[in-house]
């Protein structure tokens, strides 16, 4: 009987983010650093919002995981991950860092926080900048929507004045 080399597993976005945060999914050291420009991150969120396909992730399960790092930074994992991201690292990194509001280490070895803004009135995503920060129609930093410290009802009451 042939050994199964690949199997398709469906993960929810919530599960992926949770597993990254727990250290269950990591990066092999051979993976490059984060190279996407903020506009490409914005485009990913826009595509997901519109329901377009955004590709597959290829995760590698092995018992011999060494030389790994946490997604989004260069810090070493506290826990040895059970899965390594082989393909889809840029997408998964930007999703994790935007949803969690964490910084990402860029190809220039700079830690930056990617802020994606959203205007609910016309469902428009933008890379947050000073002008958008002053525009009351935008949710300036969508990371705040998934923060544990936000009172979502208070946030909605404040935001709906501008819709």
Image (tube, rainbow, N blue to C red):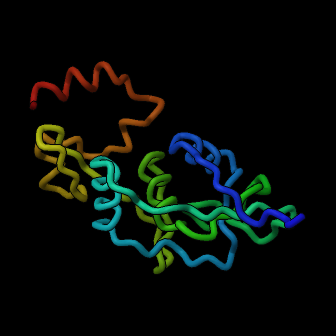
Q: Position of residue 1 (x, y in %)?
A: 90, 64
Q: List the single residue furthest toward the front.
A: 1
Relative to residue 137, is residue 57 drawn left or right?
Answer: right
Relative to residue 28, is residue 94 drawn left or right?
Answer: left
Please name whichever residue, 7 or 2, is drawn nearer the observer in this view of the structure: 2
Residue at 11 percent across and 45 percent down: it is: 135
Q: Above or below — where is 128 with respect to 11?
A: below
Q: Above or below — where is 53 with respect to 65?
A: above
Relative to residue 53, is residue 13 drawn left or right?
Answer: right
Residue 15 seen anywhere in this rendered image of the structure: yes
Q: Quadrant of residue 76?
A: bottom right
Residue 75 seen anywhere in this rendered image of the structure: no
Relative to residue 70, is residue 92 drawn left or right?
Answer: left
Q: Position of residue 15 (x, y in %)?
A: 59, 41
Q: Position of residue 160 (x, y in %)?
A: 15, 26
Quadrant in which the C terminus is drawn:
top left
Tag count in the figure? 0
Residue at 25 percent across and 24 percent down: it is: 156
Please name whichever residue, 84 or 6, is drawn nearer the observer in this view of the structure: 6
Q: Quadrant of residue 55?
A: bottom left
Residue at 76 percent across and 60 percent down: it is: 61
Residue at 71 percent across and 51 percent down: it is: 24
Q: Position of residue 66 (x, y in %)?
A: 81, 69
Please name whichever residue, 101 or 7, is drawn nearer the observer in this view of the structure: 7
């Amino acid at each position: 009987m042939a050994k199964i080399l690949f199997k398709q597993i469906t993960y929810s976005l919530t599960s992926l983010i949770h597993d990254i945060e727990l250290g269950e999914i990591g990066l092999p050291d051979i993976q490059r650093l984060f190279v996407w420009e903020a506009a490409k991150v914005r485009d990913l969120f826009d595509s997901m919002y519109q329901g377009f396909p955004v590709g597959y992730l290829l995760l590698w399960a092995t018992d011999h995981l060494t030389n790994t790092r946490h997604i989004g930074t260069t810090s070493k994992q506290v826990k040895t991950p059970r899965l390594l991201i082989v393909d889809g690292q840029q997408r998964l990194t930007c999703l994790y860092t935007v949803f969690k509001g964490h910084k990402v280490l860029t190809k220039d070895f700079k830690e930056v926080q990617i802020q994606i803004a959203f205007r609910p009135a016309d469902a428009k995503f933008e890379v947050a900048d000073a002008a958008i920060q002053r525009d009351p129609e935008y949710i300036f930093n969508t990371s705040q929507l998934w923060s544990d410290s936000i009172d979502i009802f208070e946030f909605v009451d404040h935001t709906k004045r501008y819709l």
